[in-house]
Image: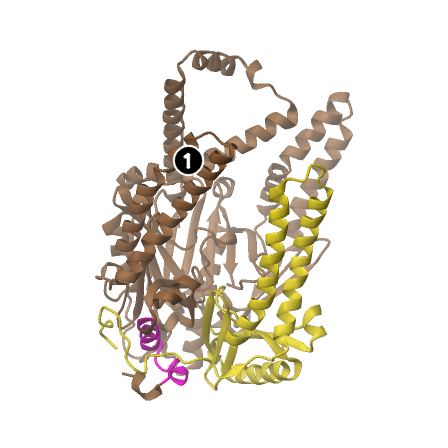
Amino acid sequence: MSGVSNVSMSDVQGELEWRRLDPRMLLIGPLHDLLRFAIPLALLFLGRGAAGDHWPTLIAAAVVVAFGMSRWFTTRYRISASQVEFRTGLLRRRSITVPLDRIRTVDVSARALHRLLGVATVSMGTGRRDRAKKDELHLAAVSIAEATKLRSELLHRRDVIVAAESGTGAIGSIDGGGQFVAAAADAPPIVRPVQTIVHLDPSWVRYAPFTTSGLFTLLAVIGFSTQYISEYHVDPSRIGPVHAATQDLSRLPRPLLAGSVLVGVLVVVAVLSTAGYLLAFWGFTLERHPEGFLQIQRGLLTRRLVSIEERRLRGVEVSEPILLRSVRGARTIAIATGLRVGRGSDRGGELLLPPAPRSQAHRVAAAVLRVGDPTTLPLIEHGRRARTRRYTRSIGVSLALVAGLLLLNLWGALPSWPWLTALVLIPVAALLARDRYRNLGHTMTELYLVSRVGSLARRTSALQRTGIIGWRIRESFFQRRVGLVTLMATTAGGRGRYSVPDIEIGEAVQLASAATPGLLVPFLAEAPAAVR
Amino acid sequence: MTEAPPPGPVDRLGDRLRRPKHQVNRRAVAYWTVRAAAGWIVVLGVLSVITVGASPRPAWLVVALVSAFGVALAHLLVMPRWRYAVHRWETTDEAVYTQSGWLRQERRIAPISRIQTVDTDRGIFERMFGLSNLTVTTASAHGPLKIDGLDQETALRLAAELTASTAASEQDAT
């Protein structure tokens, strides 16, 4: 088994000397820190340097460079058979020890500068949720070879240990379910090949304009430039081309102006989204390695390599924001312990497939889970009362808005067009409610609890029943009146909880007790009847 | 259980979740009243100052103040008693089960084997009434079970029991 070939037996026992980062860190550290402090340094230069006094800038730069270099001297780590020790910090010394089996993810990434110099950053996710930053083990620069070695040491060492402990040279591996599978010593080792689950098809970039990432980039740029303008008292109308453009635009009639601005924004957003897609997802590859982990590689300039242990996997989610859904696109996200959706440095680490055709998203979901095709199963509808609630909720909110605007109009605080315009919301709300009900559904298989919710962001989640670590049954005042509840399965990864909204109470209890046999039994009114 | 449950409402006997066994301490009613009153005092205080201070005093401001007092009074009278009727808890060897809320109610169940931490905590108002709350967390960011309004003794005993039975299960609870 390849787990053994990666690390020799002597590594298991000894090798406890401290290791340092790659010496190239002495170059990268200061450069990154200079970049990080570029703005304050530039301000200092403009402020004092302009008056002929260059010393403060030079001293500040020297401090930054020294600090950047100090990280090579102060950072050490070592990996023993059972734990990782990590020491860092110049003024405040930090020493972290993490048991190997608490390391859930290893994320190797290389920014453009790193790639140029042939080094990479290694982050180890421990999945502790309360103190995201403090528990982070982060090696700022190690050689590519060392990064690869580290990754296999951290993720597969356990196999070796288990193999060593099970004696008589037995070879084995941890399979997908976390069970140790021993192979007889004399049997030829079975070499399972690395399996490529998906490789990005460049034509999928056509889905990029239907994501909102470009919009956020645009907003960030606008925010940054307005701050820049106000801080440095730059008058944009004095800049030649800007002046000419505004002059030309202001001659246009109003509706045409609004139209062209809208088109312009849409084009810019589409271009930015496409660029962002290419930067982040170029060469996206999802592989299953026989040692029991999934590996994701992606990125054009910054190469990112994420490994997710399969035993940490608790399910998958197929996510379809409405724009993407309108062109039959979808993304796939892993539900894994230690990988919280959209949090901290793990951000984006859970992505199993960037925006791509929906059929691909479901195929990847099924391939990752190995069993069945849970995200495309026919779902159980939630019935008439759930449908009514979808309508009363969405139409109710828009009616309240219209009524509020109407009142303000009657009071004389507003003209009449706001509430008349708001009337449009009512049919929109009805359409939304219709779609929300259509999407709503759940089902259960031998292994998974499947739920689909939402309209603007439709999500289909398949959560392993064994990954459910608790239940929440919530009923609002209005739900209680119609006998519906929102059932939530809590889990250690992903979004933390996966909901089945507006399910009939009896059905909710039945579903929960069937999904986690035994857990609810002591709390059921007629206990023995429930376990079937 | 290989088959998904049949569609449509199912309301068989035995698929009903009963309430947790134990009610919280009766003093919790007073605690909830005082805690809510503290919040209301701030709101009503600010509103009163504005109303008294406004030199042309518009009628709607007075109406708003009076109705705010009405809402506060109703809230202080209804909420604590309603909560007391709802808030319940129960622990077995396998699981912790809580029920809380008033307008919006929620039941939470977590297996003992998945518990990560057990804390008791006493705020200033809780100390006034000799109460304590107990929080049980799991590895889910959305799964803590909180029991409000336990008397100090019960809270400590419960925490000790839960900690002991959690320590007995050797897993990383994810």
Q: What residue is at 63 percent from the left and 63 percent from the top? A: B36
Q: Which residue: 26% across, 70% down?
A: B9
Q: Is residue A377 shown above or below B19?
A: above
Q: Is residue B159 above or below residue A61?
A: below
Q: What's the amino acid at mark 1?
A: Trp
Residue in the picture at 52% in, 76% down: B85
Instruction: Name the residue: 34% across, 65% down.
Output: A482
Is the N terminus of chain A in the top left, top right, bottom left or bottom right quadrant? Answer: bottom left
- Identify which residue, A83 or A132, lies in the foreground: A132
| Location of mark 1 (residue) | A419
Q: Colour of chain B?
A: yellow
Q: Residue A384 location in percent, x, y?
A: 26, 61
Q: Pinpoint the chain carrying mark 1.
A: A
Which segment is the magenta one? A507-525
* Colour for chain A in the figure: brown
Residue A486 appears in the figure: no
Residue A321 at least partly seen: yes
Q: Is residue A512 magenta?
A: yes
**How far across and down, in percent of the image, does residue A468 sit?**
40, 71
In magenta segment, residue A391: no
Front in this rendered view, residue A123 or B136: B136
What is the magenta segment's predominant secondary structure? helix
| Residue A305 point in image, percent of width and height | 42, 52
Q: Position of residue A364 (x, y in %)?
A: 28, 56
